[in-house]
């Protein structure tokens, strides 16, 4: 029985990691590459194309409570199976696109599918199956997902060149999503989360004590709000860069191939940073790591505003890729350390709900480009806003439960949306 359980946890890790790999390879990072071809063939404006990317982000953010709600009712296994099915439908519609309405519906479905198969159920399942080594395993999971973004852009170009265009790409993604649906059904199983032993990072309370936090208490702490704000800015940078990188770099003297290579190298740096950050979060203050990641992203945004096919572009790759990877892992681990594995996993959904505002980035970038002929101003603005967060994040400390000072609290077992 013990051998079967040990084998099962690795099968679950493999399934959720494969799902996250596919999500990152086929959606946000590579969408900007395929959009460039669709925009030319279908004669869409930059604003129209940017809005499709914004819809992907909006749908992903607004649907982020769904996995926690569904996991409470049907479990993680069926939540991920449903997510893969929604992805397949979204990819199918994208391949059938002849106008904006159908494509907008397709990107909306892709955003919902991303939420149902993404890091909210993934982190929850990993924290449950690996209670003693959750930081390292979550780091591995996020690293695997980031590697999907490495192969995504060149893979899109390769599929389009072999299949004759962007419709072939979307057809291929539909087939893979259906295979993912079957894999999740076969491999994913649920297990009640167990509190990990040992001291936590950042002076956090032991997990058993942190587990007393309710969702309502956690989301109204300054720590949660600041971490959420940092992730909203991180997602704004990510979605904007992914959506306009090709057009921006072509404007500044690059080529579509150079832009795809740049996105892949950024994702490669992100992959390495995520893998290292899971290990570092067991040894170094996660709040300091998050502050460092946000600072590196600020430098990357500044460089990207100036970037062309030269040295500045490689500065962007190094600083932004490392900063994005560090920030993503550190923010996730910080919530688990502060509020416990179950509450921390659930309120990740609230974080992603709040990051919905980041979906305005691609649309705003498209409006700026149509009006001023350049995307650069939005990246300079992002750099300033990121820098303003560095010091407050570095000074974050373990939150103190007000209710715990008076009497023990009863944990509110809720979904991702906190009930009244």
Image (tube, grey):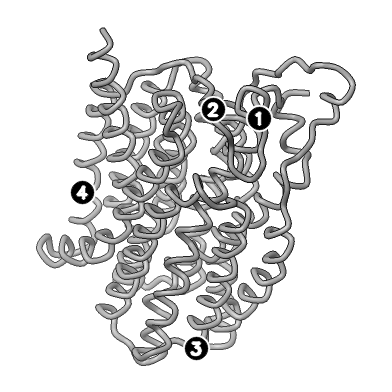
Residue in the image at 67% along x and 66% along y = 390
The structure residue drawn at horizontal position 57% and vertical position 49%, both measured from the top left corner, is 331
Q: Earlier in the sequence, mark 1 or mark 2?
A: 2
The first of marks 3 and 4 along the sequence is: 4
Residue for badge 1: 417
Mark 2 Cα shell of 10 Å, populated few (<14), some (14-19), many (≥20): many
Local secondary structure at mark 4: helix
Q: Are marks 1 and 2 in contact (CB under 8 Å)?
A: yes
- According to the image, label 3 marks what residue? 306
Disc 4 residue crowd, few under 14, some 14–19, many 20+, Cα 10 Å: some
Quarter assignment of residue 76? top left
> Residue beneath label 4, please?
171
Q: Tell me how far mark 3 sits from mark 4, CA to CA.
A: 36 Å
Q: CA distance from mark 2 to mark 4?
A: 30 Å
Reply above or below: 253 against 343.
below
The residue lying furthest to the top in this view is 1
Label 3 element class: helix
Query: In the image, residue 126 lies at what x, y percent?
Result: 41, 31
């Amino acid at each position: 029985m013990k051998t079967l359980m040990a084998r099962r946890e690795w099968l679950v890790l493999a399934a959720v990691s494969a799902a996250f790999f596919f999500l990152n390879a086929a959606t946000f990072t590579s969408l900007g590459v395929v959009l460039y071809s669709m925009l030319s063939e279908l004669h869409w404006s930059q604003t129209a194309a940017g809005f499709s990317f914004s819809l992907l982000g909006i749908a992903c953010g607004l649907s982020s409570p769904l996995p926690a709600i569904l996991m409470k009712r049907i479990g993680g296994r069926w939540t991920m199976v449903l997510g893969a099915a929604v992805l397949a439908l979204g990819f199918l519609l994208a391949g059938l696109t002849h106008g904006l309405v159908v494509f907008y519906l397709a990107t909306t479905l892709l955003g919902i599918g991303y939420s149902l198969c993404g890091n909210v159920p993934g982190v929850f399942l990993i924290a449950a199956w690996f209670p003693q080594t959750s930081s390292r395993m979550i780091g591995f999971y996020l690293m695997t997902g980031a590697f999907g973004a490495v192969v995504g852009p060149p893979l899109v170009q390769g599929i389009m060149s072999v299949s004759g265009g962007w419709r072939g790409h979307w057809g291929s993604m539909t087939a893979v999503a259906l295979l993912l649906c079957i894999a999740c059904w076969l491999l994913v199983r649920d297990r009640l989360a167990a509190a990990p032993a040992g001291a936590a990072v950042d002076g956090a309370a032991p997990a058993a004590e942190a587990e007393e936090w309710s969702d309502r208490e956690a989301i109204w702490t300054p720590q949660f709000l600041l971490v959420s704000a940092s992730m909203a800015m991180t997602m704004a940078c990510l979605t904007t860069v992914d959506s306009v990188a090709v057009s921006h770099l072509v404007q500044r003297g690059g080529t579509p191939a150079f832009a795809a290579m740049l996105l892949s190298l950024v994702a490669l740096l992100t992959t390495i940073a995520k893998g290292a950050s899971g290990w570092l979060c067991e040894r170094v203050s996660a709040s300091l790591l998050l502050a460092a990641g946000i600072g590196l992203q600020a430098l990357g945004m500044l460089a990207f505003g100036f970037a062309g096919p030269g040295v500045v572009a490689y500065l962007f790759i190094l600083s932004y890729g490392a900063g994005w990877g560090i920030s993503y892992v550190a923010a996730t681990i910080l919530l688990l350390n502060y509020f416990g594995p179950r509450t921390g996993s659930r309120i990740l959904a609230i974080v992603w709900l709040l990051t919905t505002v980041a979906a305005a980035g691609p649309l705003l970038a498209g409006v700026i480009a149509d009006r001023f002929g350049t995307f650069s101003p939005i990246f300079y603005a992002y750099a300033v806003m990121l820098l303003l967060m560095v010091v407050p994040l570095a000074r974050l400390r373990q939150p103190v439960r007000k209710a715990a000072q008076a009497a023990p609290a009863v944990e509110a077992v809720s979904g991702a949306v906190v009930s009244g």
